[in-house]
Image (spheres, grey):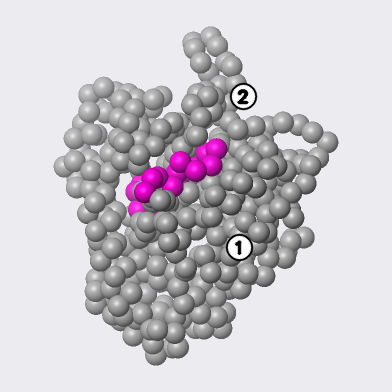
Amino acid sequence: MIPVTKPYLPDREKLDKYLDGIYERQWLTNNGQLVQELTRRLEDYLGVENLLLVANGTLALQIAYRALGVSGNRSVRPPEAITTPFTFIATASSLKWDGVEPIFADIDPDSWCLAPENIEAKITANTRAIVPVHVFGNACDVEAINAIAQKHCLKVIYDASHAFGVTYKGESLLKHGDAATLSFHATKLFHTGEGGAIVFKHKKDLERAKKMINFGITGPETIEELGVNAKMSELQAAMGLSVLEEISEAIKGRRRVWKSYEEKIPENIKSQKRNVHSSNNYSYFPILTDAVKAIRILGDLKENNFLARRYFYPSLDLGGPFFCPSSRKVSSSIVCLPFYHDLSSESVEKICKLLKEGS
């Protein structure tokens, strides 16, 4: 079975050198040498400052909420954050888990990102933040979202799990918002096996978050914050450093597969409208048909040993008090095709042939 995605595994000799160093130092966690090195190298590669490595992408979101004062403050009614229903469950569940009520606003039907024109009507006295998602690495309308946030004194935390290395108008997309969070899960373009990061706009927020990820401990006998254990380990950092050294090869392979799909995909298949100011990091290859065809395509591909997925289905507004028609339509009609760095041209050709036959 050809999977929908698979991890990029770096050269073992590179990884083993980092692992040998861990064995020599016998330092496995608590801001070790490799975590510090990966932090510096990621800041340089991404062109950002104030980057904090954490254990996974969900914790990245939760720490960002706490560090920015979105969660953690008790009141008569829970704080609210406006977010998108077209996303992985962690975007919304991390809010709920941290005592923040997710308020869903509908997406743009073409870009599939949170539509700025749908945000203001959802703002109440309890709204603390906007949590948009750069869906499949496609940049949101960051200027419009920032203008709304400034007008209503709201924080903006971008779920940028798909947006590793993406630039917007020539600079890192991660510079937008009060914070942007990344997932370094094994299936991501860049990964540490499990892991994540937060890029903060302000250094003071970074310094507060550093305390939070280590139980709030700031010294042998000092606890200054309500904290949790969200630290990245040296083993995760070793994988990350090894992958980062080969990231250009991983992107090169993904670009090749992307171009191959573009050349062979049937003309009647719709794709995501990319932000013209945003670069493409080739994270996913989603297509849009209709709900009936999407189910048929999934079945046809599976019968031929290709595993595709409906990312993201179901739309998270289902079963709740919100109605987001664009999200529901895209969610029910989307198919993410198999996509990873060394997917063969023959596989792409077979997949596109099946799409043509089923359309």
Q: Nearer the viewer, mark 1 or mark 2?
A: 1
- Which residue is located at x 72 percent, y 65 percent? 323
Q: Is 168 colored magenta in this rendering?
A: no
Residue at the disc numbered 2: 226
Q: Residue furthest top?
A: 221
Q: Is residue 44 above or below residue 293?
A: above
Which residue is depicted at the point 45% across and 44% down?
Answer: 174
Work out whether residue 277 or residue 339 is closer to the camera in this orientation and state it: 277
**Residue 70 seen:** yes
Mark 1 packing: few (<14 Cα in 10 Å), some, or many (20+)? Answer: many
Look at mark 1 in the image and give the residue it sits on: 107
Residue segment shown in magenta: 170-191
Where residue 58 appears, as percent x and y from the top left, is: 53, 44
**Residue 332 image position (x, y, % from top left):** 58, 73
CA gap between label 1 and label 2 equals 35 Å
Label 2 Cα crowd, 10 Å radius (few <14 / some 14-19 / many 20+): some
Disc on res. 57: none
1 or 2: tag closer to the N-terminus: 1
Q: Secondary structure at mark 2?
A: loop
Q: Amino acid at mark 1?
A: Ile
Query: Do residues under tags 1 and 2 come within 8 Å of each other at their CB atoms?
Result: no
Estimate the x, y position of residue 45 in percent, counting from the top left. 31, 40
Q: Quadrant of residue 321?
A: bottom right
Q: 130 or 208, which is in the foreground?
A: 130
Residue at image position (77%, 46%) is 124
Q: Nearer the viewer, residue 17 or 136?
A: 136
Picture layout, residue 68 above or below residue 183:
above
Q: Quadrant of the C terminus?
A: bottom left
